[in-house]
Image: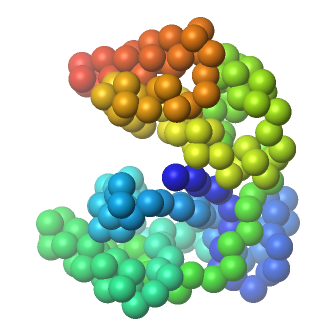
Amino acid sequence: MRTCVGYTGGTKPAPTYRSLGDPTESIQVEYDPTKITYARLLEVFFAAHDPTWPSGAPQYMNFVCVADPAQEQAARAAAAAVAKRLGKPVLTELRAATTFWPAEDYHQKYALRADRTLMAEVARWELTAAEFRASSAVARLNAYVAGDGTVAQLERELASLGLSADGAKYLDRLVRTFTGRIACGND
């Protein structure tokens, strides 16, 4: 439903990019379990990074935070399945969820911020920084601009994204271009 980049873990309270200390850069994901399961989110997470890579500095560690025993059990099962499939130990850490500090505004929805056309669309909504960070529509637009999302997904939700007719056409062309590159193996 929404995402927020930020920092978690460590001992320094209220870290910032310029004064990070020992927390780790992270992303907070709020999801609707009637639309996607935690197990599916774990599949996507483990596919999005090399879980056999040894973490170095705390700033860039590979980890998944778990909020409760059920999530911990699911995360351990997912890691075990990945280790079995790869034939290597999974080095991605499992941590209990702790305080999450949102990153500075200029780090939020980075892919979308680089797209002038869609940012002009979003500017019409007159969102505060907190509203921008919390907006499901902004999170979806950011994902599409980053190349995540299919034409079929876009067709199902395009009308709910709040774009003008021109903005909707632009996003449709963009997603079809990404899909064409991926289908041709040119990503």
Tell me residue 62's x, y (percent). Answer: 48, 68
Does residue 171 appear in this view? yes
Q: Viewer-proximal residue, 45 or 68? A: 68
Pick out the residue farthest to the bottom. 69
Q: Position of residue 37 (x, y in %)?
A: 33, 64
Residue at (78% x, 44% y) in the render: 106
Tell me if 85 is positioned left or right of 59 in this view: left
Give coordinates of residue 95: x percent, y percent. Answer: 50, 83
**Number of marks in picture:** 0
Examine the rendered structure and indicate whether residue 176 appears above or below residue 94.
above
Residue shown at 47%/60% (left/top)? 31
Residue 77 lies, with reference to residue 144, above or below; the image says below
Q: Is 36 in front, or is 112?
A: 36
Question: Residue at 71% across / 28% down in the picture?
Answer: 122
Residue 70's quadrant in the figure? bottom left
The quarter of the image holding the C terminus is: top left
Answer above or below: position of 76 versus 181: below
Colour logic = rainbow
Residue 30: % across, % down: 53, 61
Where 156 falls versus 41 (above or below)? Answer: above
Looking at the image, can residue 170 be seen?
no
Residue at x-position 47% and y-position 80%: 66
109 and 165: which is toward the camera:
165
Q: Quadrant of residue 50?
A: bottom left
Tell me the quarter of the picture where residue 75 sits: bottom left
